[in-house]
Image (spheres, coloured by chain):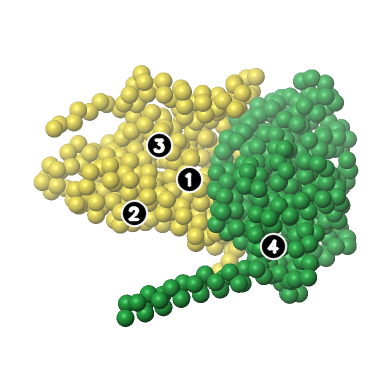
């Protein structure tokens, strides 16, 4: 009796192992390392929604055509809590446990820089939709991105502020513990002082993680009498900073960076943010062609205008799928397939995305245009200027 | 320079008021039970969320109650209701988590760990119930910016500072001048002899939690009005810093908590004002460490000898 029982158990076990094994050959698994909770949950939500829309499109047509076979897509969304250490753990888990072929994300440079190290070490292709800090992809052949870089974005902000505000003196308030904010603030400062002379950044102040009161820094900034304040910060902090600056009597303009561009900025910031400018990846109001089609479908499905993260995730995911198709065929051996996808990705020379046309350089970074938008009275981000490298 | 300095004094008064209000809650509970209620920062967070829902309701943001009250009336009602409900949260914590342990005679260490866990439960419960996206606290009163030359003050800033002062005076009065205050001090002195004198120890402890938590509720509303973006972890760092403020002032002493809160507020703001802002926490906590090295019991604390 015991023997029969164990034989039965053995049979069950082999079946249980074999069945997913059979199914696996027809599935492409891609991991998403995104912030669904923590500091910037809206960013994770936008990423997830955009990816879900793309997945529904492709699976609805029977799957992705790779060579002669069709593969269904399986997206695994893991929450990195917008923390650097969790992003590393999530990357590790997606690579080892879920055996994904490629990773999309993390979005913010704070998480993308350390997670990129893990992906590169474990030879898994990773593409960050939103990270703009150069270190994310620098000397990492397995890491790519869909966004422009801060060394490009910084001068865009400098030139725009000099032209629009006729400014000569700038002030900067940045987040010390955020790679993105700190990196961009320093690039901005160097470029501004190169163009306006030494000491023309009259105040260069910082704050810590989870800070809610910025009154001391803002008092110092206002006392230095700058022509405008540059805020390379996440949208949730922007809402508090702009409001407190107005409380302290500041009436001048603000200039922001792409981290402002969340769909949640206006719900949090309200009328204080109206009339401010920031540089970003695309302008939703007044878009045309494929971009407009994406915006309309997203809005119809989820009820709000997609922010730049949604659009960039769409582009980043399509880049990965393109690379998988370019690879020609999948062997089922995860290591070999990852290598083939990476090589195919590195070979993509240009790509027509909904955030603009991109060309890739040897670091895996796209060369693409930035736009500057203005927040109008309705809280929409209106196209003001496009700057191309 | 002078104007900047005056402006920073005002900033420090506002920021210190929050530390003071929260530190008072820590110190009340510690003074009576010798328990560090680490969930207190999160009770402030809960207070802010309660205030958010009541304010949205009274301002007619929900469809099932479409009667918008005028801002001033709504604000007064919000303050009262939030203080009551937050007090209820504090008392439930005491009933569910702390009292059973006290009954079983558990060591104080375990109660402190329980308090830490209660805080985590409040944070993550909120995260699970309401999701990770932030809430924007509605603007209940029109903001007025008073400009005295180059110095700007808002009506809210003045209200916050006044509230901290009033709460301090009220608590100081209750603890030192009333009968129940005397009972509170007596329990702190010897909690085994006090019940023998016919003092209902549980009632006094519940009263302490009502006082502390309703002040946390008030701090929550004022905080939400001043920094109108709510998230489940908003009480964490300010709660811990307020605890440090209470220790620096001499934990267990109302005057100590009040003074400690303002000291921490001043140190944080002034370090940013006169040094590079990236050194803020390094400098401010070094200063607090120095204060504690010179006076280990805090500014108003008295050294206690434990028997046995």
The residue that label 3 is drawn on is B243
To which chain does the residue with label 2 belong?
Answer: B
Task: Name the residue: 47% across, 44% down.
Answer: B236
The residue that label 2 is drawn on is B93
The residue that label 4 is drawn on is A331
Q: Can you tell which of label 4 and label 3 is closer to the viewer? A: 4
In this picture, residue B172 sits left or right of residue A167:
left
Does mark 3 fall on the same chain as mark 2?
Answer: yes
Alpha carbon distance from label 1 to label 2 = 16 Å
Question: Which chain is represented by green in the image?
Answer: A
Question: Which chain is represented by yellow in the image?
Answer: B
To which chain does the residue with label 1 belong?
Answer: B
Q: Nearer the viewer, residue B74 or A308?
A: A308
View extreme (front): residue = A3
Q: Is residue B157 above or below residue B296?
A: below
Task: Name the residue: 66% across, 29% down.
Answer: A205
Residue A70 in percent (x, y) is at: 74, 71
| Mark 1 residue element | helix
Q: Is residue A100 above or below residue B67?
A: above
**Callouts 4 and 3 close, C-beta under 8 Å:** no
Alpha carbon distance from label 4 to label 3 = 59 Å
Alpha carbon distance from label 4 to label 1 = 51 Å
**Callouts 3 and 1 close, C-beta under 8 Å:** no
Q: Can you tell which of label 4 and label 1 is closer to the viewer? A: 4
Task: Name the residue: 80% across, 59% down.
Answer: A326
Q: Residue A133, located in which quarter of the rendered image?
A: top right
Alpha carbon distance from label 2 to label 4 = 57 Å
**Callouts 4 and 1 close, C-beta under 8 Å:** no
């Amino acid at each position: 009796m015991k023997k029969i029982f164990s034989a039965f158990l053995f049979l069950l076990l082999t079946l249980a192992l074999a069945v997913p094994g059979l199914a696996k050959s027809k599935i492409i698994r891609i991991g998403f390392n995104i912030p669904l909770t923590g500091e910037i949950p809206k960013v994770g939500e936008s990423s997830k929604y955009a990816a879900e829309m793309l997945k529904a499109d492709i699976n609805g047509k029977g799957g992705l055509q790779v060579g002669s076979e069709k593969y269904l897509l399986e997206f695994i969304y893991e929450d990195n809590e917008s923390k650097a250490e969790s992003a590393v753990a999530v990357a590790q888990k997606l690579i080892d446990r879920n055996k994904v072929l490629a990773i999309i994300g993390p979005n913010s440079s704070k998480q993308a820089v350390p997670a990129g190290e893990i992906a590169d070490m474990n030879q898994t292709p990773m593409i960050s939709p939103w990270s703009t800090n150069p270190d994310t992809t620098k000397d990492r052949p397995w890491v790519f991105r869909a966004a422009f870089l801060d060394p490009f974005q910084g001068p865009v902000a400098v030139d725009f502020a000099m032209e629009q505000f006729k400014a000569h003196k700038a002030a900067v308030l940045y987040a010390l513990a955020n790679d993105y904010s700190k990196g961009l603030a320093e690039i901005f400062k160097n470029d501004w002082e190169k163009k306006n002379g030494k000491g023309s950044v009259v105040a260069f102040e910082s704050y810590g993680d989870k800070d809610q009161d910025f009154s001391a820094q803002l008092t110092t900034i206002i006392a230095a009498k700058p022509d405008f304040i540059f805020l390379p910060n996440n949208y949730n902090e922007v809402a508090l900073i702009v409001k407190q600056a107005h409380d302290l009597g500041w009436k001048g303009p603000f200039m922001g960076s792409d981290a402002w561009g969340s769909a949640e900025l206006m719900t949090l910031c309200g009328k204080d943010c109206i009339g401010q400018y920031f540089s970003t990846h695309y302008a939703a109001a007044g878009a045309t062609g494929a971009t407009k089609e994406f915006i309309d479908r997203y809005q119809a499905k989820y009820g709000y205008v997609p922010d730049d993260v949604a659009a960039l995730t769409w582009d980043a995911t399509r880049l990965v799928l393109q690379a998988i198709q370019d690879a020609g065929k999948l062997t089922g051996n995860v290591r070999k397939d990852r290598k083939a996808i990476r090589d195919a990705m590195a070979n993509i020379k240009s790509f027509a995305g909904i955030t603009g046309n991109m060309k890739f350089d040897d670091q895996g970074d796209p060369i693409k245009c930035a736009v500057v938008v203005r927040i109008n009275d309705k809280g929409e981000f209106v196209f003001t200027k496009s700057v191309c490298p | 320079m002078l104007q900047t300095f005056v402006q920073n004094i005002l900033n420090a008064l506002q920021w210190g008021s929050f530390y003071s209000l929260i530190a008072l809650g820590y110190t009340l509970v510690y003074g009576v039970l010798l328990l560090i209620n680490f969930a207190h920062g999160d009770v402030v967070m809960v207070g802010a969320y309660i205030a958010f829902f009541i304010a949205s309701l009274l301002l007619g943001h929900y469809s099932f109650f479409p009667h918008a009250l005028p801002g001033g009336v709504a604000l007064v009602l919000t303050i009262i209701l939030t203080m009551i409900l937050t007090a209820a949260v504090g008392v439930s914590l005491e009933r569910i988590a702390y009292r059973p342990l006290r009954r079983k005679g558990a060591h104080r260490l375990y109660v402190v760990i329980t308090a830490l866990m209660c805080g985590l439960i409040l944070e993550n419960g909120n995260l699970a119930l309401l999701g990770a996206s932030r809430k924007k606290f509605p603007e209940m009163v029109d903001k007025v910016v008073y400009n005295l030359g180059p110095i700007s003050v808002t009506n809210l800033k003045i209200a916050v500072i006044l509230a901290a002062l009033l709460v301090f005076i009220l608590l100081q009065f209750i603890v030192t001048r009333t009968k129940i205050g005397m009972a509170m001090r007596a329990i702190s002195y010897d909690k085994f002899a006090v019940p023998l004198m016919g003092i209902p120890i549980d009632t006094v402890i519940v009263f302490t939690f009502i006082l502390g938590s309703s002040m946390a509720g008030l701090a929550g509303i004022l905080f939400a009005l001043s920094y109108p973006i709510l998230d489940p972890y908003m009480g964490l760092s300010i709660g811990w810093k307020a605890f440090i403020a209470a220790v620096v002032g001499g934990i267990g002493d109302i005057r100590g908590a009040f003074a400690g809160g303002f000291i921490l507020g001043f140190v944080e703001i002034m370090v940013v004002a006169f040094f590079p802002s990236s050194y803020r926490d390094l400098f401010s906590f070094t200063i607090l460490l120095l204060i504690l090295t010179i006076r280990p019991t805090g500014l108003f604390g008295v050294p206690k000898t434990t028997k046995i």
